[in-house]
Structures are given as C-alpha cells and as structure tokens.
Image (tube, helix red, strand yellow):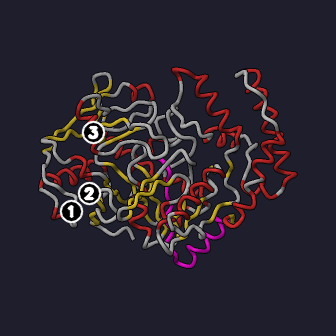
C-alpha cells in the first residue's frame, strides 16, 4: 500500500505541481489535503500550461482519481470555474472526488478576510484575501459550513445564522460595514448544491479502501513547510498544516500507511507575502532570479521575494516532516552565475547558529552565513541523467543534498513535463 506525501520544503511555490505531475502517471489517487484557492500549481504539458488552484495536479493525468480531502477549504465558485476551464480545454474532470466534510468558504468569510487585513494596516499578515483564514477559524470555532450542509437547507440556515450572529456585529460596529443577510447567503450556497453533487463522496472511506487494495495514493500539500500554522514562521503563515502530519488529518489516513515523504526544494529560495526571509536579495541577483525563474504567484499574481538557497530551512523541513527524499526544482535558473552563495548557517547576536531558531525574534534578526560554490554556464535543460549535468552543477546538487539531510532523488532542469532528471524512483 504505497502512500506518498509530497510537500513544499520552503515557503511554497517550489514546483509541487511539476513533481506531482511527474508521478501522476504512476499513481491511482492524488489527494489535496489542506489549504484552499490561496495556493496554486503550474503544470506544463507539452506546449500547454495549466494553472491549478484548488484541484490536485493529478487531474491532468488520465487514469488518476483527483481528490479534495476534508482538510481543504473550498470556494464553490472557484472550484466550478476551474472545472469548467479544464473541461473547455478537453480535460476530463469527471473522476474528481470532493469530501463532504471539507469546509466551504462563504461570502462572509471573504468579506471578513479583506476588511480585517485592511484594518491591520502595517501589521497585516499578507493574506490573499480569499477567506481562507476566517474559514479555518470558523472550523475551529465550530461554526463552519461543510459541503454536506448544502444538502440540508434547515441545518445550513441554522449554521449561517449562528456564524452571522457574531460576524455582523463585527462588520457593523467595528468595521462600519453593512450587515450580511442570512437568506442571501443561504440562497447563494444552495445554488451550488446540484452542481457539486456528482463529486461529493466519503473520501476517507474511498482512500483507505484504495490503500487496502494496494493502490498508489499521493498526498499533495498546497503550501510550504515554513507556512505551516504550527511549524512555520508564525504569524506570517497559512491557516492549516501543509507539513506531513497534515496529510493524515486532512485526508483521514493513519500515519502508519505513509511509506514515503518527498520534499520539494527550489534550487534557490522564494517567498510571497510578509515575514522574515534571511537570504532575501534586494540587488541585481535578486531581480535576475525573479526574471529568469518567472517568479510570480500562480494564484496571487504577486512578485515573489527571491534569495539564495537556505540549507538551514531545508534541514528544518527534513526534521519536522520526516522527509525521505527531495525533488530539487529550477536548477536551470542558476545557469550563468560564476559563483553561487548558499546559506549554511545564521549569525544571530554575533553567534553562529546552524539550526532554525524557535524564537521568532531570533529568526527575524538572523543574518545568513554563506558558503560560495562554483557556478556553471552550460545549458542544462536537455540533460537526461545526472551525469549529463556540468561538473559544477553536479557538485552543487551534492552539496545541497549533504547540507539538507535527505537524498535528492529528482532534479528539475526546465518547466516542461519531460525536463526532469530522475535519480531514484519515488515508487
């Protein structure tokens, strides 16, 4: 029963879509287990580029069943729009399964998200304004709306009333906004019921039965390790658990069934939104990484902050996720630098620190300690094996592997589906 978790080992945007798509032809189920449409994957198939937000990357692989698990928060309009867009391009989306226990992003969650972020001013978190955080807050506060509630109008109405009792007080008295009508929200949500019905399923049962039948199940995280609500750079994080443990709770599969945990690492480091970023570059190198790497958010459209590779973060990701392998992406972007700095440690208050500090204050003041590695100028996009890479590129990969604490089993040398070097099979 091979069950694999594939997740981001940095701040997200590492290229999880490419990695998932690489495995898509070999797996039976691809499961999104957390997050919402605040994340995005770009998958390039031939000359076609697909930007996915809520849907698992496996939806592009014939024969693979894509699953949206109970740990995901779902904006029905975004999901239906994404399905429609793929159908228009000839992609079969009929096999999608949607957990009836997944929580729904309601219109009032989006409103609260946007007005709260504006209210915070300089203290804002840098959310996408899509209602993700407020929806997870409702879930924890036990006033959330789940997919299954769309099929019982009485329960749905009661739950919307309970949620708006408090939210309307906040909107009108604190933010000077209009109150939101219960009937209007209920009517809008009920309009999605019939359209979503063909996809709704008991996904926990389906996935566990699949594993018992020796099917291959891949669990796909939406964001990166450093954005995890518990283990990330809090409070500049997402509202769920993209780390490996989140796959168990977000899909309803026990940890003993997970056989491999694969971390996606970009050959340099990027981040979207506010928060500390020790290796961030504000010079021509940073702009070159952004330009060559096409570093703009798939979902947000925001330019990503760029910096050199941070081995301290990679080691941390290995530890908190129990990583068994790395998939190194965008190695080709580094082609052309004579020397490439790699952050091997931090300097904090004059002391060298080689592991991620647990203190937010210390991490905020961390300065990178760099080791210089020789670069390469040869085009590596056509490389089919590790031996095809220039010697300095090989040395760079081996150095990152040693610093990060887990073997690098695949390397991305370009954006295309076939521009990948597979060193060790993930299956």
Q: How many marks?
A: 3
Q: Which residues are magenta?
A: 202-223
Q: Position of residue 137 (x, y in %)?
A: 67, 39
Q: Earlier in the sequence, mark 1 or mark 3?
A: 3
Q: Earlier in the sequence, mark 2 or mark 1?
A: 1
Q: Which mark is residue 268?
A: none
- Say whether residue 311 is visible: no
Q: Position of residue 76 (x, y in %)?
A: 66, 52
Q: Earlier in the sequence, mark 2 or mark 3?
A: 3
User: CB under 8 Å between callouts 2 and 1?
Assistant: yes
Above or below, 269 against 91 in this view is: above
Identified at 55% across, 65% down, the residue is 66
Split into 4 quadrants, where in the image is the C terminus?
A: bottom left
Measured in 3D between alpha carbons, the distance from the residue under mark 1 to the one under mark 3, in whole angstroms, is 24 Å
Q: Which mark is residue 308?
A: 3
Residue depth check, mark 2 versus mark 3: number of the one nearer the observer: 2
Q: Label 2, secondary structure: give it.
A: loop
Identified at 70% across, 22% down, the residue is 175
Residue that carries the numbered disc 2 in the rendered image:
413
Please identify the quarter of the rendering in which residue 159 is found: top right
Q: Is residue 321 left or right of residue 80?
A: left
Q: Which mark is residue 382?
A: 1
Please identify the quarter of the rendering in which residue 345 is found: top left
Identified at 63% across, 56% down, the residue is 80
Measured in 3D between alpha carbons, the distance from the residue under mark 2 to the one under mark 3, in whole angstroms, is 17 Å
């Amino acid at each position: 029963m091979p069950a694999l978790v594939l997740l981001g080992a940095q701040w997200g945007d590492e290229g999880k879509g490419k990695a998932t798509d690489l495995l898509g032809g070999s797996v039976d189920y691809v499961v999104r287990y957390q997050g919402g449409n605040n994340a995005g994957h770009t998958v390039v198939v031939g000359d076609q580029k697909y930007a996915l937000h809520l849907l698992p990357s496996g939806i592009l692989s014939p024969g693979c069943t894509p699953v949206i698990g109970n740990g995901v928060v779902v904006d029905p309009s975004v999901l239906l729009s994404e399905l429609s867009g793929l159908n228009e391009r000839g992609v079969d989306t009929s096999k999608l399964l949607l957990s009836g226990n997944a929580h729904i992003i309601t219109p009032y969650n989006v409103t609260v998200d946007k007005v709260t972020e504006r209210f915070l001013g300089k203290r804002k978190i840098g959310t996408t304004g899509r209602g993700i955080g407020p929806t997870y807050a409702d879930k924890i506060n036990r006033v959330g709306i789940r997919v299954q509630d769309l099929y019982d109008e009485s329960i749905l109405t009661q739950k919307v009333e309970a949620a708006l009792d408090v939210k309307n007080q906040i909107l009108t008295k604190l933010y000077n906004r209009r109150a939101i009508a219960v009937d209007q929200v209920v009517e809008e949500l009920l309009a999605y019921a019939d359209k979503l019905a063909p996809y709704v399923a008991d996904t926990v049962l389906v996935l566990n039965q699949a594993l018992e039948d020796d099917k291959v199940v891949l669990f796909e995280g939406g964001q990166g390790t450093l954005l995890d609500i518990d283990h990330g750079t809090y409070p500049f994080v997402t509202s769920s658990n993209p780390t490996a443990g989140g796959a168990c709770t977000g899909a309803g599969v026990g940890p003993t069934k997970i056989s491999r945990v694969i971390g996606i690492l970009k050959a340099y480091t990027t981040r979207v939104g506010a928060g500390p970023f020790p290796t961030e570059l504000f010079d021509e190198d940073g702009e070159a990484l952004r330009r060559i790497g096409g570093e703009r958010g798939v979902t947000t459209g925001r330019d990503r902050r760029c910096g050199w590779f941070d081995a301290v973060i990679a080691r941390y990701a290995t530890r908190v996720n129990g990583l068994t392998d790395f998939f190194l992406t965008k190695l080709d972007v580094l082609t052309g630098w004579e020397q490439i700095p790699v952050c091997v440690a931090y300097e904090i208050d004059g002391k060298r620190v080689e592991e991620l500090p647990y203190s937010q204050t210390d991490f905020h003041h961390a300065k990178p300690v760099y080791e210089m590695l020789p670069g390469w100028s040869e085009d590596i996009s056509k490389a089919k094996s590790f031996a095809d890479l220039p010697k300095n590129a090989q040395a760079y990969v081996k150095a990152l592997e040693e610093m990060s604490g887990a073997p690098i089993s695949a390397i991305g040398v370009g954006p295309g589906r076939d521009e990948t070097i597979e060193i060790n099979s993930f299956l």
